[in-house]
Each structure stands twice: as structure tokens, then as C-alpha cells.
Image (spheres, rainbow, N blue to C red):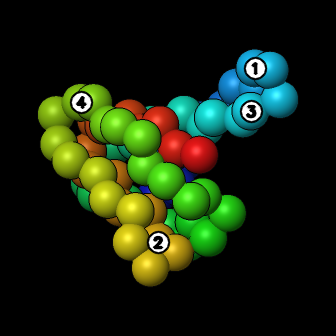
Amino acid sequence: MNQKNLGGFAITYKGETTYLIHNNSTEEISIEAKMFNELIDYIGLNDAELKDGRLRVGPYTSVLLK
């Protein structure tokens, strides 16, 4: 995995923070993500999953997390 192809930012509104993470590579990524409690949604060419403290994001896919 090349984490140079993983980017994102945090959005805080009315005291609540949401995170947007994007995988702009041609390969699936999997990272430790224990700080997140919920995968709100994903959009892109593939799917995503938050399970057992790990985030898996398919190629060219973005996720919203809390």
C-alpha cells in the first residue's frame, strides 16, 4: 500500500466533527482507524468498510466518517 495516495480532512460544525478520507490510488487501502465510530457513507468507483478498528477503502473511493 502506498499511503501517499490517501488524503482527507476534518470538518467541524456546531461542535460535531466529520472526516472525509479519499483513496486516489488504483489499489484498495486498509488502515488502522480506531478513532472512528461510524462509516456514514462512501462514494466512488468501489466500496468501503469500517470493521474491528480498521478502515478499508477501495480504489478511487471517498468515505465520510464520525
Mark 2 in CB contact with mark 4 (< 8 angstroms): no
The three-letter code of the residue at mark 4 reads Gly
Tell me the CA gap for discs 2 and 1: 25 Å
Residue 8 lies, with reference to residue 56, above or below; the image says above
Quarter the N terminus occupies: bottom left
The residue that mark 4 highlights is 44
Image depth: mark 4 or mark 1 in front: 1
Q: Residues within 10 Å of mark 1 (few under 14, many from 20)?
A: few
N-terminal-most mark, 2 or 4: 4
Mark 3 residue element: strand
Mark 2 in CB contact with mark 1 (< 8 angstroms): no
N-terminal-most mark, 2 or 3: 3
Q: How crowded is mark 2: few (under 14 residues within 10 Å), some or many (20 or more)?
A: some
Mark 1 in CB contact with mark 3 (< 8 angstroms): yes
The three-letter code of the residue at mark 3 reads Glu
The three-letter code of the residue at mark 1 reads Tyr
Q: Which residue lies furthest to the bottom in this view?
A: 52
- The quarter of the picture where residue 51 lies is bottom left
Q: Position of residue 42 (x, y in %)?
A: 32, 37
The residue that mark 3 highlights is 16
Q: Could you tell whether 14 is left or right of 37 in the image? A: right
Q: Where is residue 62 in the image (x, y as percent from the top left)?
A: 38, 35
User: What residue appears at the point 63 percent right and 35 percent down from the top-left corner?
Assistant: 18
